[in-house]
């Protein structure tokens, strides 16, 4: 079997198969192979030159995953995405709170609060919905400090 540069293979060395990648194919059907993550060998031994054709074989593809494993991985990815979104939202909320605290109320805003505060419990004769919204926003800014 002829291998091309870049093919994933396994090489038989001392009766042990090591995974690697073909880097060179010589004219005499020998190969140069770069071994992947070999802990038992030194860095100089990670490139094996002149590997004979009977010492090299194609690397088997990984076993297909069953449906439960695929669903579990998809669930983990979804959970990670939700966690990342929640973390970003929490960071944005904290930044908004910090910006809110850093902005002091102006004299007009203090006057608006003083004018609306007595009207808040009047019911139908009270402030408009827009005034209530603005009042709530300003009170929140006032309390953040």
Image (cartoon, rainbow, N blue to C red):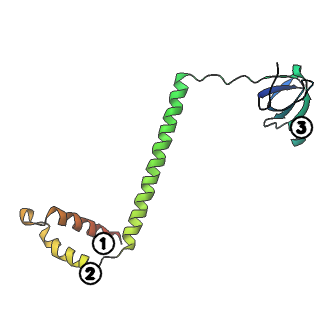
**Which image quarter: residue 132?**
bottom left
Which element carries disc 1, helix, strand or loop?
helix
Q: Which residue corresponds to mark 3?
A: 45
Q: CA distance from mark 3 to mark 1?
A: 69 Å
Q: CA distance from mark 1 to mark 2?
A: 12 Å
- In the image, taking residue 121 as reference, residue 62 lies left or right, namely right
> In the rendered image of this protein, does residue 103 appear above or below residue 88?
below
Q: Residue at x 48, y 43 (%)?
A: 81
Q: Marks 1 and 2: which is nearer the front? A: 2
Q: Position of residue 22 (x, y in %)?
A: 81, 31
**Which image quarter: residue 101?**
bottom left
Q: Position of residue 83 (x, y in %)?
A: 47, 46
Q: Marks 3 and 1: which is nearer the front? A: 3
Q: Which residue corresponds to mark 1?
A: 142
Q: Quadrant of the N terminus?
A: top right
Foreground residue, 4 or 41?
4
């Amino acid at each position: 079997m002829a291998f091309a540069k870049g093919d994933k293979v396994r090489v038989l060395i001392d009766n042990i198969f090591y995974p690697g990648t073909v880097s060179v194919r010589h004219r005499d059907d020998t190969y140069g192979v770069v071994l992947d993550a070999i802990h038992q060998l030194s860095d100089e031994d990670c490139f094996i030159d002149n590997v004979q054709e009977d010492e090299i074989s194609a690397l088997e593809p990984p076993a297909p995953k069953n449906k439960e494993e695929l669903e579990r991985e998809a669930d983990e990815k979804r959970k990670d995405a939700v966690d990342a979104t929640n973390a970003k939202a929490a960071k944005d909320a904290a930044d908004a709170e910090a910006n809110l605290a850093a902005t002091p109320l102006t004299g007009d805003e203090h006057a608006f609060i003083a004018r609306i505060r007595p009207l808040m419990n009047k019911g139908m004769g009270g402030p408009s919905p827009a005034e209530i919204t603005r009042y709530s926003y300003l009170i929140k800014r006032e309390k953040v400090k």
